[in-house]
Amino acid sequence: MRLIIALTTVLIVFPASAALGSELDDLLDRSREASYSAEQIITCSTPDGVEDAVVRLSQVGGEIQVGAPVDDDLSVSSGYGGWTLLQGGDVVSRTAVEGTSDEAVARYTIDGGVRTEFLGRDATVYKMAGEGMIRAELVIDNEIGALLRVITYGADGEVYCERRFITFDTTPPTMRISNPAETDTLESLATDTNLPESLAGFTRLDQYSDEDGFVFGYYSDGFFSFAVFETPSIVRMEAPFRMTFDNRSYDRSFTPGQVIYSWESRAGAMALIGDLPPDMHQKVLEGLPEPRDPGIFRRLWRNLFG
């Protein structure tokens, strides 16, 4: 669960920019290299109620730290190829990954953009459309390319999530990581897996495994993204909602900016974590191994050994 939690945080920091169009790709690439600090509010209207949070962001040269303004003790630092979990300024754990897969196939179009102002700064607002509907609105700072606000929409045209800066400082912040811990490396998975190469318009960009039998696949349609996990142990959530699609039952939990599904299949325990609007959930889940009773011997093993 340590790895799942940390990767979950990384998924909500930036959208996957592949195949969005050269102009917006360039702007998002600039935003990843920008240096700034900010506070961001995340508000999502989910089928299970409203989820919101305020997070603190600090970014320098492609690495970003995410933490809570009310708690300086815990933060996650992420960048190209990995993440680092810090507590009290010390590294608790660190994982590095190296992607090798091709970019996602283009699914969305971007308009030419309209000049606007956000937090007193010159910016441009872009609308992203796909399959005949507006899926997102992005406000990008014209000076440094930082992503100041992102609104995502469901298929009904209603707002699903909004992420927006409420404070923004372009002074390069100081980010220090002390007492580096041993790096856990996920290796590219070459063996057979239950994770498909593509499903519901999403492409599997990366896939990894570790020596403990953990398998992780990362999917994107060029903007929205999710991770699928195959794990030896059951993925448990606090007070999940029991959700059923076509007689398939899952545990579901929404947090600000993301959704988590967990279930058991004949292949093992599974989880899905992503920023998908609710109308996309069922189609994605239908392409993955269906929930099944793992059998008495597997249940007994888990009860005895976790």
Image: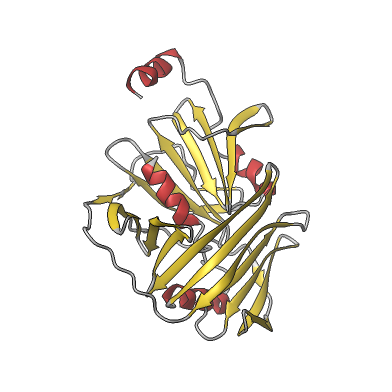
Residue 146 visible (yes or no) = no
Along the horizontal axis of the image, is 17 left or right of 193?
right
Residue 180 in which image quadrant: bottom left
Colour scheme employed for the rendering of this structure: secondary structure
Position of residue 247 relative to residue 114, above or below, is above
In the rendered view of the protein, which quadrant contains the C terminus? Answer: top left
**Hey, which quadrant is residue 297 in on the image?**
top left
**Relative to 91, is 249 above or below?**
above
Which of the image's four quarters has the N terminus? top left
**Camera-nearest residue between 283 and 172:** 172
Give residue 72's position: percent from left, percent from top: 40, 59
Instruction: In this rendered view, identify the residue nearer to me: 193 or 264.
Output: 264
Q: Note whether residue 119 is visible.
A: yes
Please tell me which residue is depicted at 47% across the width and 50% down the height of the picture. Answer: 8
- Name the residue rendered at 48%, 63% in the picture: 103
Image coords of residue 17 (percent x, y):
52, 67
Total marks drawn?
0
* Relative horizontal placement of residue 233, taking residue 89 as reference (left or right): right
Left or right of residue 161, residue 66 in this image: left
Q: 130 above or below 232? A: below
Residue at the extreme front: 70
Q: Which residue is drawn at 30% across and 42% down?
A: 210
**200 vs 109: above or below:** above
For the point 50% across and 28% down, the residue is 264
**Could you tell me residue 197's position as x and y percent?**
49, 48
